[in-house]
Amino acid sequence: MEKYSLLSLFRHAGRHHEDWPRAWRDPAPKADYDTVIVGGGGHGLATAYYLASKHGVTDVAVVEKGYLGGGNTGRNTTIVRSNYLRDEAAHLYDFSLTLWEGLSQELNFNVMFSPRGVMSLGHTLQEMRDIERRVNANRLNGIDGEILTTAQVQKRVPLLNCSPKSRYPVMGASWQPRGGIARHDAVAWGFARAADAHGVDILQQTEVTGIRQRNGAVTGVETSRGFIGARRVACVTAGNSGVLARMAGLRLPIESRPLQALVSEPLKPCLDTVVMSNAVHCYISQADKGDLVIGAGADGYNGYGQRGSFRIIEHTLSAVCELFPAFSRVRMNRQWGGIVDICPDACPVIGKTPVEGLYFNCGWGTGGFKATPGSGYVFADTLANERPHPLAEPFALDRFASGALIDEHGAAGVAH
Amino acid sequence: MAAQPRRLAEGGRIDRSHVVDFSFDNRALQGYAGDTLASALLANGVDIVARSFKYGRPRGIVGHGPEEPNAILHLGHGPASIPNLRATEVELFDGLEARSTRSGLQRLFGPFGRFLPAGFYYKTFMQPPRLWMTWERLLRRAAGFGEAPDGRDPDTYDKMNHHCDVLVVGAGPAGLAAALEAARSGARTLIVDEGHEFGGSLLAETRTVAGGSGADWVENTVAELSSCPEVTLLPRATVSGYYDHNFLTILERRTDHLGPMNDGGSRQRLHRVRARQAVLATGAIERPLVFANNDLPGVMLASSVAAYVNRYAVAPGDRLVLFTTNDGAYRTAMDWQGVGREVVAVVDARQHPDGAQVQAAMEAGIDVIPGHGVIEASGRGRVSGAIIAPMDDGGDALTGPSRQLECDLIAVSGGWSPTLHLGSQTGVRPRWSDAAGAFLPGDLGERAVCAGAVTGRRTLRECIEEGASAGALAASRTGFGDGDTTLATPDTEESPESSPQALYLVPHRKPVSRAPKQFVDLQTDVTASDIELAAREGYTSVEHVKRYTALGFGTDQGKLGNVNGVAILAQALGQDIAATGTTMFRPAYTPMTFGAAAGRDTGEMFDAERHTPMHAWHEAQGAMWEDVGRWKRPYYYPRSGETMQQAVNRECLAVHDGVAIFDASTLGKIDIQGPDSAVFLDRVYTTGFRRLGVRRCRYGLMLHENGYIFDDGVTARMAENRYLMHTTTGNAEAVYAWLEFWRQTEWPSLDVYLTSVTDHWATAAVVGPKSRDVLRKVCTDIDFDGEAFRFMDVREGHVAGIPARVFRISFSGELSFEVNVPANHGRELWDALIEAGTEFDITPYGTEAMHVLRADKGFIIVGQDTDGSVTPADVGMEWAVRRNKAYGFLGDRSLTLADHLREDRFQLVGLATADPRTVLPEGAQLVEEPGQRPPVAMEGHVTSSYFSARLDRSIALAMVKRGSKRGGQILYAPLANGRIVSATIVSPVFYDPEGVRQNV
Amino acid sequence: MLLIRCPYCQEMRSEEEFSNAGEAHIVRPPDPAALSDAEWGDYLHFRKNPRGLHREIWVHTAGCRRYFNVLRDTVSYEILEVYPAGVSESDAPGKTTP
């Protein structure tokens, strides 16, 4: 893998950028692999990278039906944070955040992780109680967090409507300085390039059409490019998990729904942090390009259409105008939808299935992007050792039988 | 400089009698009514309107409509300013102030352009890691166009809903013909166009239509449409989105062309349309040609040059070189010559152009140079020449030496790209047509018809004919007309055309990577070499190329660059364009104002407030408010000089020692009737209701199927088969929906009926030892004697002469009567009770005192002490759960799940702080040992915490691991501010554990 | 933005008047106590979630407030059938993909 640096950029500029190598190969599929990872999004590629780099498992293919990062990886609002309430989720997401902090260097690919802080506004007494509870829990779990007064909120976000006369006045906020945003596509590409350098085969335009089993154990996947044998098959196909599960004869505790997002036209810097509000239903940040990146809600019904209902956009934009009256004259450039797999407790499912050798990593709901490196790391460890990574253990499928749900609706909420 | 140096002496659809003063970058300029900002800038000879995104290169106006990539300007200043408007879409008004949005920082980058290929930032700025945030600040400052306005938007926006049979999008020749057919059939028709005048391309048309000018034909057609009662014409309106089930959004700009208004009317209106049929007559946008330095000011679309000349009487230059791949663009050269300007040459990529228009141009003395391309534009800040060279048949390679033509304007035409965005928004992929040399709309099924240039039609006659049949077809699908057209196709001056040539990248003497920059997407500064680089590095999907290079990511969404970009990628990959495909277009077609999408739903209309009938009284008393769901509830009633704590203490003591009054109208109320009411209640509550006596009340706990507490409240049996259920304030709607769900879908055989009556009743709780005395004064037909009216009884009678239900229930532990009267008598009741209570110093109290009083008693609040993961056993309420029932109740089975039987679950306890004056923050976490380093195991958290006036000390409720077995143990709350508070685990019932006080 | 025909009101009304209540035809086990934790968990949480034809429950929240069933394609969002609550899956109109 050629190292990217300012120096290499200068060197290639001298050669008119004519001999930059491919970021990853485009190999023909082999007949079989030790491990086939289904899904070439951030989580799948991260799984492949850590499998190869940390566990020496390099006989790996990542099988992607479209193009890398074409699902939720490239459709989300890129918020990264770890201020979750429950210990299990907090530890997992904070481990992920720690990986984010060195990810550009680890991958030698600038994923533009920008720890500009994440603010969650509180508008009611109950929200302030929840903020107090969550921030205190975070601090005891070693996760940075502060509680801001309305005045402190206003100082950090001058354009925010902090008037006590507003419909839901801002009473305060939680604040995680280490949180921020990142460049979503770059995460997929960076992991792909680094995984490829370790020998992982990345197979785009290869759609899995079946999961082959013998005697209760997985033997490989049928694809649009023929059968690919595998000792282990790991499905990391957000927005399509139910479809893959069905191929293996399984059902999941998941419903798939369109989640919408939108961006404004590019503006000069006017918002330096991420602002989220559950009560007013809005989350917003400003991308490096200048667009306001705004997360809208999920539709109230199942759908795989990667587009959603306009009323959600109307509701979201009225929330934006309520929180940021100055943005009323700003214009929406583009809106789109991604398909999120939602679990009953707003937490993911990571681990084994009743089919031997078949693993799932899914159900990240509206907040999977922030977990990308951590998810890949613990899933790779789970695959390599054929037992759950300690951080992944509470997220096993059997919690839906035992009742040991990890309710994160509060922290997951609307806002990611 | 002379005023409007590039304005033609005559012609154009402008009003020369109305001079309009405006400014650009603080330069005072003049234009005419009828101008766009772009045409006025061109008339004034303004060449440079922007600096480019990445390289800081000078940029001029390229187009004349929504495709314009460069002239993105900021209008006005202060709260009424508007960022990022396209000058081509801004109608000129008096006093308009425009400024360019990119001027400074990019120029610094310009000289380093070579080091800034596509995706350079992915490869750099990684070491040292901490410096990234510094780089990022610099990048952020360089990016972005205009500034967000500062302050609240002075304008308002509104919305209008439409249901129409046929929605016609676009009022060019095809759209007008379609609308006319639909209108004549009697269908309810809505025709929409983004321009302020209908007519589209006909407004810049110099040939005759039906014997008159194009504008005449438009005028006649519009006149007929206007006379049809079922037709609505909507100019200055852009269809921005096409959603499922034929829902479309239209943004109408109502006052923007008049400048800042603030007169109370709406600035913009969002039309929400359900169309039974849509006719998409959205036209096409001319495709530019990609050659070296093609971003110089003075390189414009051929159709735009014609539009400026014909419609605005502006000649954006003196000496024209037209570079084309097709016959149609020759008209620009003819028009140019027609207004007395010089046509230096027509450079035609085709080897043997021989259409009628080509002949006509040659006959007019225009120098036509076939088989050539403009391979490079020269000039500094403005085109001063076109370097041309002969090309081979396919336009792939140069076949001879180049030479320079002196000129100041290069008009380009690489063919046309249909405006197929709306169809694509519905998820239907466009398909490539080699014959049309363009992407065409995919199959939209039976819901919509495309007509005109959007389907690849090139001649006026074809567009009008196709429009007419589309209109007739759409109307007939909605039951109007038989699908046959009635419109006689007007005579148009058409001439046979020779076939166009596909040319997506003009070859240069040097390879793409070494040639001067050949821009594909001007707004995002994407060059042909960027696309080749992306392909070289393996970013081969068209979506990857878009995301890696930013092709099509601008505010124009790639209206000009998309097809050339796809074609260059296809060539780099050695595959055809069809296989390469295109990216999907998303709403909005052109950017849509946030405020318009929000409409009136901001400020006080953001979310409806619910007020009880007594609201005005509370307000007059100076109550502070708590938001609970949508309700505004009195939080406490401060008297002058009181702190909140003092007010709450006073209110609590009034409850304990005298009499107080509380507005409980917000509690959810559901009337349950029918013979199976009791069976129904038994299934939805953990408690049993079958044996509850008439006129008696019982507390009920409601679970979700997962066994977690969902709601609680008191239900009264009003009659044999009639119950009144109370829910928590915040959950009223959810509980009602939940009950109806089960009743209707799972137990339809139960004979039971539910009615939400929350708003039907107003409730005043009269509480305290003297409450009986107050009520006796205003109610004579209910016996308030302790034996006659027991705790948990309900009575009906008259209070203050109003028919009332009185519940003897208590959420404070004190003697308490909740008086319910029909809501419209609520204030009357309240006033009567206040008056009757005056001699007892009756004290109104708010939700905070209510919370303190109930916490004294260890009563939980669902949603505060529980959080959706708490079972009845967790809060010590197994007494409210009956076991061993045949069918059971909702959630029953979950109570015995393995996890719910765990010993170490979090359980409700009381906490007494070591210092009785210290009130723990609600949400504080509890640990066994203070001062440990994270991660620290948490033993629980505080859910409720108050200063209790009666006990004169702080009290708290908490959920603590194995809490019910840890009485007496000390836990510590390390707070975010560094303080550590210690507290002992005690019973959650702090006051009157025997419950004797309410039995007075 | 779906347009849904309420089978009771017999009118095509906009999605905004309705709420979705999840997968249809999930029958509550008649004797929950007889189920294992896993079987109960399956009833509680596991769903078909098909990509394609899907039977689901809707309620006309801002209309007649009655629940009904819809057969809808979760990719095209086309609504193929609408029928009242209480119709069993075997009697339901339309076909789903197996």
Image (cartoon, rainbow, N blue to C red):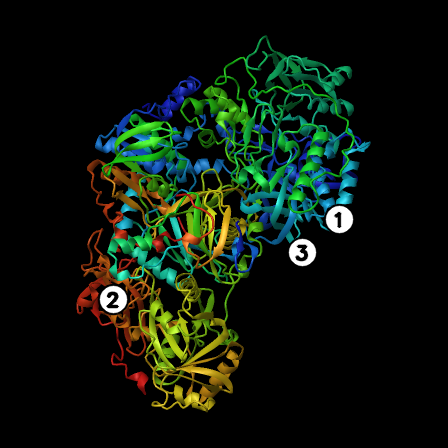
Instruction: Give the Cα distance between marks 3 and 2.
Output: 61 Å
User: Is the Cβ of the residue at disc 3 closer than 8 Å to that at disc 2?
Assistant: no
Give the label on residue B228, or none. 1
Do we see residue B372 in this rendering?
yes
Residue B601: which numbered mark, if any? none
Q: Chain of mark 2?
A: B
Q: Which residue extends farthest top?
A: B400
Secondary structure under the numbered disc 2 in the rendered image = helix
- The alpha-carbon separation of the residues under discs 1 and 2 comes to 71 Å
Residue B73 location, x and y as percent?
A: 60, 38
The residue tagged 3 is B263
Q: Quadrant of the C terminus of chain B?
A: bottom left
Q: Which comes before the other along the chain, label 1 or label 2?
A: 1
Residue B360 lies left or right of residue B694; in this view the side is right
Query: Is B151 situated left or right of B47 in this image?
Result: left
What's the residue type where badge 2 is placed? Ala
User: Label 2 neighbourhood size at 10 Å, few (<14), some (14-19), many (20+)?
Assistant: many
Q: Quadrant of the N terminus of chain B?
A: top right
Quarter where residue C12 is shown: bottom right
- Above or below for B81 versus B891: above
- Give the camera-side residue of B768 and B10: B768
Look at the numbered discs 1 and 2 and tell me whether their residues touch, using CB distance below 8 Å: no
Question: Quick one: B230 or A224, which is closer to the camera?
Answer: A224
Nearest the viewer among B419 and C90 is C90
Q: Residue furthest front?
A: C91
